Amino acid sequence: MKSARSVIIEEFGEPGVMKLQAAALPDPGPGEAQLRQTAIGFNFIDIYQRRGKYPVPLPTGLGHEAAGVVEAVGAGVGQFKPGDRVAYMNAGLGAYADYRNVPADRLVAIPEGISDEAAAALVFKGITAQYLLRKTHVVKTGEIVLVHAAAGGVGQILCQWAKGLGAFVIGTASSPEKCEIAKKAGADIAIDYSKDDWVETLLKETGGKKANVVYDSVGKTTFFKSLDCAAQFGTVIVFGAASGPAPAVEPEYLNKKGCLFLTRPSVFPHNADPNVFRENAADLFSAISSGMIKASIGERFALDEIVAAHRTAESRQTRGAIVILP
């Protein structure tokens, strides 16, 4: 039986509620694989769950994605063997750990040429971008795509992938420096949405053209302006709440704004079926291998620096993905 370190919370609250503890890790059970984790992904949902904004039963671990090496497998696991490089998301909370047992049907093999850090930085965020770009709204060549928080982990992937699919990409970010990051990630134009007149600036830059689809992970502070930026019959997709939940809207308002479509999807239902998850992951890895998507790692923290990692993320000063190294 191996000793494993993992991050646990027993109450919701500020970053200090997270505690790193060591405990015995049993051998993998039927259908499980035991991983030595080499890189752990960070996502803003980790903060929401730590705060209790998205309540989960306590005590609990945190974290949804990681990459690592298979150490052992339980009965009935035939697809993976010790030594395989794998990644996962949505395998139950608890990715903030150095060793972990996970359901083998949540694992995907990491292709050659993709590093463990890149896989950890890209699987959850990339799978999020995949269902947004390929399923929630199928982006087509020549469409105008608006991506909020375009300098963040998901935002940069959305910009890269949408550009690779032939879209004209508008990125928004909260500072001139972040706007430059968005442009490097593929945005044709980037707008500083911390300014009150950012919608007017956007329309001036596009010659009055609005977006066929708006990807809004910011929520409260951008939502109504997102509706202002959507073209007639356009789609507004709210998939996050970095500034707070998006406010309620009357259906008639969507009609007045141009017969808009509005949806609030989630990555988890789109990847609940293991076979669908692997198909989506294959689509993502293909985009990575082709060079369409590149990992943008902004910060690296050790597992015992997890409190600092969350504080850095909450400051909204990060540029690119955070990776945690056990």
Image: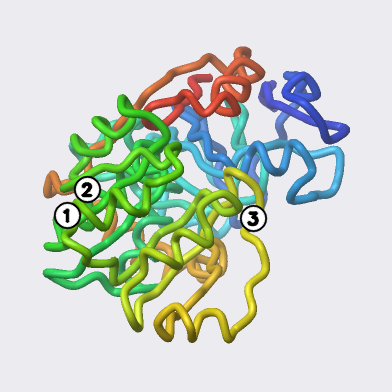
The vertical placement of 115 against 231, above or below, is above
Closer mark to the observer between disc 3 and disc 2: 2
Q: Is residue 72 left or right of residue 193?
A: right
Residue 228 x/y as whole percent? 42, 66
Give residue 25's quadrant in the image: top right
Q: Amino acid at mark 3?
A: Pro
For label 3, the SS is loop
Foreground residue, 214 or 35?
Answer: 214
Q: Amino acid at mark 1?
A: Lys
The answer to whether residue 85 of the structure is visible from this angle is: no
Which is nearer the N-term, disc 3 or disc 1?
3
Q: Determine the residue positioned at 51% across, 71% down.
A: 273
Q: CA distance from mark 3 to mark 2?
A: 40 Å
Quarter placement of the N terminus: top right
- Pointers 2 and 1 in contact (C-beta within 8 Å): yes
Residue that mark 1 sits on: 163
The vertical placement of 232 against 281, above or below, is below
Residue that mark 2 sits on: 160
Q: Amino acid at mark 2?
A: Gln
Instruction: Count residues near mark 1 (Cα–Cα under 10 Å), then give few for <14, some for 14-19, many for 20+.
Output: many
Q: Is residue 288 left or right of residue 243?
A: left
Q: Which mark is residue 30?
A: 3
Instruction: Count residues near mark 3 (Cα–Cα under 10 Å), then give few for <14, some for 14-19, many for 20+.
Output: few
Foreground residue, 241 or 228?
Answer: 228
